[in-house]
Image (spheres, rainbow, N blue to C red):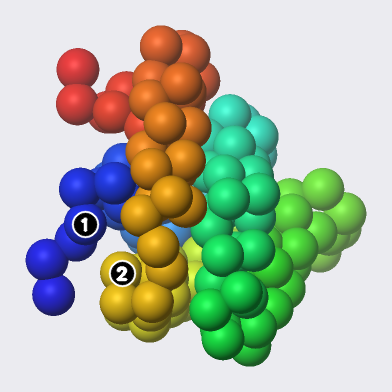
Amino acid sequence: MNRDRRLRDLSDDHHQALVLARRATRAAAGDGTAAPRVWNEVVHRFHGELAPHFAIEERLLLPAVEQHGGADLAARTRNEHAELRRLVVEDRQDVSTRLHRFGALLRDHVRFEERVLFGFIQERVGDAALDLVADACEDRRPAATSICRTTQS
């Protein structure tokens, strides 16, 4: 399915999130020397890129998903966002364990959103919600820490 142009910025975010997830899981599987540095990158990018991305989805997309019969999809998305936040903010396991758990969950979460949630949105959610998402991503573009389009410069 072709991605609606109004979801492309979020899909671009997902691509960058998959790159981060891969870095995290590789560092977790390594000899441990890179793990602290990669964890610091994860924390920095979580706050600067992923958290704003989650906010757009939670504020604009998920209410529309719920209104169109996708309460279970919205609940899963919120739960996974919350677990990713918890791993970054509260989890005190060793760094390699955190990296592995974060990387695996982020990878699975992005795949769910791309393969299931966004398909549902394109088929069932109206133009008004999609227009709001596009505007929100456009508003994020100039910010230096924004994931939307910053990776294409």
User: Residue visible at 51% across and 65% down?
Assistant: 106
Amino acid, disc 1: Asp
> Where is the N terminus found, in terms of image quarters?
bottom left
Q: Are marks 2 and 1 in contact (CB under 8 Å)?
A: yes
> Where is the C terminus found, in terms of image quarters?
top left
Quadrant of residue 66 within the rendered picture: bottom right
Label 2, label 1: how far apart the Cα atoms are: 7 Å
Q: How many marks?
A: 2
**Image height check: is 97 above or below 49?**
below
**Image height check: is 136 above or below 125?**
above
Residue 97 in sight: no
The extreme left residue here reads: 2
What is the secondary structure assignment of the residue under circle 1?
loop
Q: Mark on residue 4?
A: 1
* Image location (x, y in percent) of residue 6: 29, 46
Residue 12 in sight: yes
Q: Is residue 85 left or right of residue 66?
A: right
Of marks 2 and 1, which one's residue comes earlier in the chain? 1
What is the secondary structure assignment of the residue under circle 2?
helix
The one nearer the camera, 100 or 136, is 136
Quadrant of residue 122 within the rendered picture: bottom left
Q: Mark on residue 122?
A: 2
User: Residue visible at 87% across and 54% down?
Assistant: 90
Amino acid, disc 2: Gln
**Image height check: is 117 above or below 8?**
below
Dot 2: within a 10 Å radius of its alpha carbon, few (fewer than 14), some, or many (20 or more) residues?
A: some
* Image location (x, y in percent) of residue 53: 53, 43
Q: Is residue 93 left or right of residue 105?
A: right
